[in-house]
Image: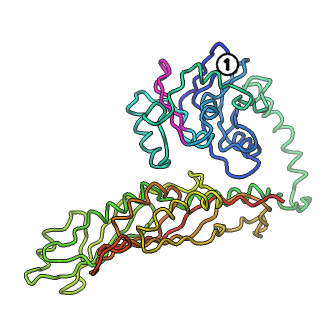
Amino acid sequence: MSEPLILSLPSATLVFGLDWFPLIGARADRLGMRIARRHRSTHCVLAGDAAGSVGVLTLKAGRQHKNVLHSAAQNVAVLFASGTMALLMEVGAAGHWLVAVHEGAVVARTDRFYPSRLAAEEVLAELRLAYPQLRILGAPGAPGVPDMAAIEAASSAATQLRRIAGWRPFFPWPVQCFALALVLVLLVPAAWRALRPDRAVAAGPAQEDPAQAWRDAISRSAQGRLVHGLQGTRTLLEAFYELPVNMGGWRLLQAECAPHGAQWHCQARYERRETGASNQSLLENIRVDWKVEFASLDHADASWRIAAGGIPLAHRRPADSRENERRFFSALQGLRAGFAQLRVGKTLPLPIPAPLDGQGRPIARPAHLPAYASRSLQIVGPLRSAGLLLPHLSFIAWNKAMLTLREVNAPGARDSGLTLTLQGVLYESENPAVP
């Protein structure tokens, strides 16, 4: 990351260009401070115990400021505490500053400068995929762009950067090295005599921090899970939309896609329907990226791969079960008339392998530790209705997608010749209640 910009204004000193990390669960202040120390930061900012993100900053010794510092991005979060907003503005010679906030929390990988507006708009396009409800300040239907004076005026104790206490060397580095070498010369022989095998005393294993061990396990589990969301689902649907139904006398029967890492592995089955159809007539019409295998004289299977567009779950901040029951379920109820089936299962905690202590024994999970949960999801309906789902799929990962072509006597709103079946999971934030 580039050097942060520190801007001294009449009533406040603003800092641009912090690194931001999402916070999930209670006691955000402790988790935020732990993240800041892990990154060896000199300052951090988070707005209270319920903060949704923490910003960290590392200032070199020569750049330490006596003035109170405020995060410009956190000021924007204060100004737009609800909804999902993005601000793109030019800040002098520093370039175009882009920051996005979601429900009062600064979004990770924003609060950055870009050399041109075009470069920043490319990042905005990626943000829209992760946050379909994103509004650009100053765009039609969105609030206006705040000027620097308004951002400055939002400075308060909630946006102030905290100085992180840490050890600072009193002597120059060469003197430290000489002192360390002298200590080693004097102490190593004595330590060896004290720790000889015949005098060594068996020491007990180092004590594990159960909460931190479980947080690391939860993070690893989430990192290995991909959320397809809007972009991945759109890529999948486009693959189905582009499938030819009739090709060289062959007719589509069924197509299926399943995720494998960062790709969709897809397969379509075709049946020879016309008398003049042949293997050659099919091969002359297939796409260049298809691999075709002929299962019999009358059936052929075409396979191909496309990018899945998934994002690691650890990079997202899902809603909890109550929020989904209020908003996501309401959205599905509004779409119910366009689908044959819309089924959502009960919330279940995400299975996480228990971390082990130094003796190889499982560490008990601390009570009320926030993690992730999921619900099973199955959707069946006409392919034409699938586009209605896109604005509501931010935290969904698909396990299987199947398109079936069949004869329908009376197509309707919930039934058609092209039937799409989607099976997957909806991820949620699991926040156990504190007694």
| Colour scheme in use | rainbow
Image location (x, y in percent) of residue 362: 76, 69
What secondary structure is marked by label 1? Answer: loop
Compared with 68, 382 (above or below) is below
Q: Is residue 116 in sight in this rendering? A: yes
In the rendering, at what x and y percent does residue 424 appear?
A: 50, 69
- Which kind of residue does numbered mark 1 sit on? Ala
The correct choice, above or below, for 31 with respect to 388 in the image is above
Residue, x 72% and y 64% (percent of image)?
355
- Which image quarter holds the N terminus? top right
Q: Quadrant of residue 364?
A: bottom right
| Count of picture labels | 1
Query: Is the magenta region chiefly helix, strand or loop?
Result: strand
Q: Residue furthest top?
A: 10
Q: Residue 393: percent from the left, percent from the top?
A: 48, 58
Q: Is residue 260 left or right of residue 58?
A: left
* Left or right placement of residue 172 versus residue 252 in this view: right
Picture quadrant of residue 351: bottom right
Residue drawn where x is 73% and y is 17% of the image: 66
Is residue 316 or residue 182 the one in the foreground?
316
Quick one: label 1, few (<14), some, or many (20+) residues within 10 Å?
A: some
Residue 177 in view, yes or no: no
Residue matched to label 1: 12
Q: Position of residue 225 (x, y in %)?
A: 54, 62
On whether residue 94 falls in the magenta region, the answer is yes
Q: Is residue 374 magenta?
A: no
| Viewer-proximal residue among 175 and 96 | 96
Instruction: Locate the C terminus by quadrant.
Output: bottom right
| Left or right of residue 144, residue 177 in this image | right
Q: Nearest the camera: 254 or 382?
A: 382
Magenta residues (range): 84-100
